[in-house]
């Protein structure tokens, strides 16, 4: 049975006057190797208005035992059979009380500064409904192996709503770096549970119909690459099929972009580098000593041409970071 949410007293004076509650959901199943690092990345930020929700799909390994070590820091814990990751996430968000929401997969991590930055941005900019951090990646043992060099990445709203942020075109949107207001989640009705691999992709298309995605110029989370193990790797073909099924009812990309991107990997890289759009992003100003909203013309690619070629040469059997 889920544990009732508790109200924590503020532990840090800088949050005494203003605060914004954040609800985080982690859905897991047999993740004993990684779940502890994920949990610690959430609770060690010592954020005063955090609601942490974990849904475990009745793991058969040591996952639940590890989770219970941190029971006092977990507001809602559910351990029962479910219908997959998205079902567990949707179930967890039914208990969410925070104004800001996100989910963190059971093998990814947040950085120590994540919640303080997220809180400050949403407090200062009430018109901002949805943000994404700078993409970063780590290997199986938790070492950072890749950081996007393109601070202030452009995420055109119509590109997202049309489903153009997919591998063959603009690349993935990094889910673990996403934070949004609960009002936006409620507006779109949450995840489409008919989808088993690409429900996050479909959710972004609906978010973009209602809100602009603001790029943050610092990392907020890291994706753990586990080739041959995780859903994004093992289920890549099924993910692609679901993505294309979602896109059937959406506006197709320009024919020339679609043709060039499908012709070769180099063509896809060059297209992203050549497409420039106005980007709405949030960055820190040393002069102002605060976060500021900016608008600037930026390329669609999150990486330089040289970086993408280096990654391609170094990993013949794995995807280029998207």
Image (tube, rainbow, N blue to C red):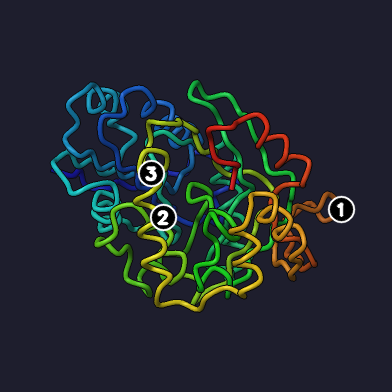
Sequence-wise first label, 3 or 2: 3
Q: Position of residue 294 (x, y in %)?
A: 76, 65
Q: Tell which of 23 and 106 is nearer to you.
A: 106
Which mark is in front, 1 or 3? 1
Give the spatial CA distance, label 1 vs label 3.
34 Å
Q: Mark 1 points at which residue?
A: 287
Give the spatial CA distance, label 3 vs label 2.
42 Å
Which quadrant of the figure contains the N terminus?
top left
Which mark is in front, 2 or 1? 2
Q: Which residue is drawn at 52% across and 55% down?
A: 19
Q: Which residue is drawn at 42% across and 39% down?
A: 233
Which mark is in front, 3 or 2? 2
Q: Mark 3 points at which residue?
A: 8
Q: Where is residue 147 in the image (x, y as percent from the top left)?
A: 67, 38
Q: Tell which of 140 and 102 is nearer to you.
A: 140
Taking the view exactly as shown, the residue that stands out farthest to the front is 263
User: Looking at the rendered structure, which numbered label has been put on residue 240?
Assistant: 2
Indicate whether 49 appears above or below 272: above
Q: Residue at x 39, y 41 (%)?
A: 105
Q: Residues within 10 Å of mark 2 (few under 14, many from 20)?
A: some
In the drawing, does residue 8 fall left or right of residue 46?
Answer: left
Residue 127 shows up from this direction: no
Q: Tags 2 and 1 in contact by the CB under 8 Å rule?
A: no
Q: Residue at x 60, y 31 (%)?
A: 315
User: Looking at the rendered structure, which numbered label has been put on residue 317?
Assistant: none
User: Residue 144 falls in which quadrant of the image?
Assistant: top right
């Amino acid at each position: 049975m889920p544990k009732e949410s508790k109200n924590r007293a503020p532990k840090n004076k800088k949050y005494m006057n203003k605060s914004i509650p954040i609800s985080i959901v982690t859905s897991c199943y047999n993740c004993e190797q990684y779940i502890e690092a994920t949990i610690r990345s959430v609770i060690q930020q010592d954020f005063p208005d955090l609601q942490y929700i974990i849904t475990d799909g009745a793991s058969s390994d040591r996952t639940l035992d590890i989770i219970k070590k941190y029971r006092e820091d977990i507001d809602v814990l559910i351990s029962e059979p479910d219908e997959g990751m998205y079902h567990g996430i949707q179930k967890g968000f039914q208990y969410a009380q925070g104004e800001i929401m996100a989910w963190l997969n059971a093998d990814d991590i947040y950085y120590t500064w994540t919640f303080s930055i997220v809180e400050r941005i949403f407090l200062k900019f009430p018109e901002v409904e949805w943000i994404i951090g700078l993409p970063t990646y780590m290997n199986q043992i938790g070492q950072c192996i890749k950081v996007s060099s393109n601070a202030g990445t452009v995420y055109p709203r119509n590109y997202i709503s049309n489903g153009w942020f997919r591998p063959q075109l603009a690349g993935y949107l990094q889910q673990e770096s996403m934070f949004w207001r609960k009002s936006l989640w409620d507006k779109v009705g949450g995840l489409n549970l008919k989808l088993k691999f690409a429900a996050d992709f479909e959710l972004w298309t609906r978010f973009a119909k209602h809100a602009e995605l603001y790029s943050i110029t610092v990392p907020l989370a890291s994706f753990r690459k586990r080739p041959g193990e995780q859903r994004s790797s093992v289920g890549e073909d099924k993910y692609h099929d679901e993505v294309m099924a979602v896109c059937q009812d959406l506006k197709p990309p320009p024919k020339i972009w679609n043709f060039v991107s499908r012709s070769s990997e180099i063509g896809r890289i060059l297209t992203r580098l050549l497409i420039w759009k106005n980007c709405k992003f949030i960055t820190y100003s040393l002069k102002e000593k605060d976060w500021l909203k900016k608008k600037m013309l930026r390329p669609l690619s999150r990486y330089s041409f040289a970086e993408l070629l280096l990654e391609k040469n170094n990993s013949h059997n794995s995807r280029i970071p998207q």
